[in-house]
Amino acid sequence: MKRSLMPVLAVSVILTSCGFSAEKCVQADWHAIGRADGERGASEERLQKHIKSCAKHDVDIDQNLWRAGQVEGLKTYCTAQSAYRLGRDGRKLKTICPDAKMSELRAANEKGRRYHDISLEIDHLMHERADLRAEMRNAIKKADVKVNTAWLRLKISQIDLLIWDLERQRQQYDQL
C-alpha cells in the first residue's frame, strides 16, 4: 500500500467503523474519505450511510467532495490488477466500474478467484494429509495392528499427487 494512502485509509476506517461523531462529521476530509471508499469499490450507498450518520448530528457533509474523491478512488479499484487481487482474496468485483471495462475486469477477477479456490483445495488436502500422517505415526508408535498403515500410505500418496496436480494448475492463475 502506498504511504500517501495510509492516512486516508486510517481516517476512513476510523470514521466508518464506529459511526461518525459530530466533530468527525465536521472535521472530515470528505474528498479523502470518498477516495478511500472508491478504492474499495464503494457506491453511492456508502455516501448515503455517511449522510445518515452525520445527519444524526445535524451536520451536512460535502457530497461533491466525496463524489470527486470516489471517482479518483475508482480509478484504482477499476483496474485489472485490482480485480485480480480481489479474486485472489476470494472476493467478487463490485459492478461499480464503467461498463466498457467490466468484461476485462470480470476476467481478471475470475482468474484471481480460480487461484483462490485452488489454494483452498490445496490447503484442505494438506490438512487431510497431516491428519493421516499423524494417524499413521500414532499407529506405528503404539504398534496398533488394527490400523492399516499400508492403506494410510496409499491415501497419503494419492493426496500428494492431487496436491502436485493442483499446484501445477494453480500456476496458470498465479499472475494476471
Image: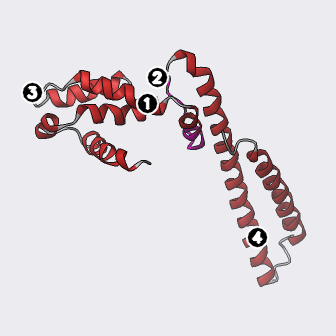
C-beta proximity under 8 Å, tags 2 and 3: no
Of the residues tagged 4 and 1, which is closer to the observer? 1
Magenta segment main secondary structure: loop
Sequence-wise, the earlier of marks 4 and 1 is 1
> Cα distance, mark 4 to mark 2?
47 Å
Q: Say if 114 sits above or below 162 in the image.
A: above
Of the residues tagged 4 and 3, which is closer to the observer? 3
Sequence-wise, the earlier of marks 4 and 2 is 2
In the rendered structure, find residue 133 and report the number of the disc placed on it. 4
Is 175 inside the magenta-drawn segment?
no
Depth check: give the residue in front, 140 or 30. 30
Of the residues tagged 4 and 2, which is closer to the observer? 2
**Mark 2: which secondary structure?**
loop
Provide residue 121's location: percent of width, then percent of height.
Answer: 70, 49
User: Which image quadrant for residue 20?
Assistant: top left
Q: Say if 70 sits above or below 158 in the image.
A: above
Residue at 45%, 29% (x, y): give it. Answer: 75
Q: What residue is shown with label 2? A: 96
In the rendered structure, find residue 61 and report the number of the disc placed on it. none
C-beta proximity under 8 Å, tags 4 and 3: no
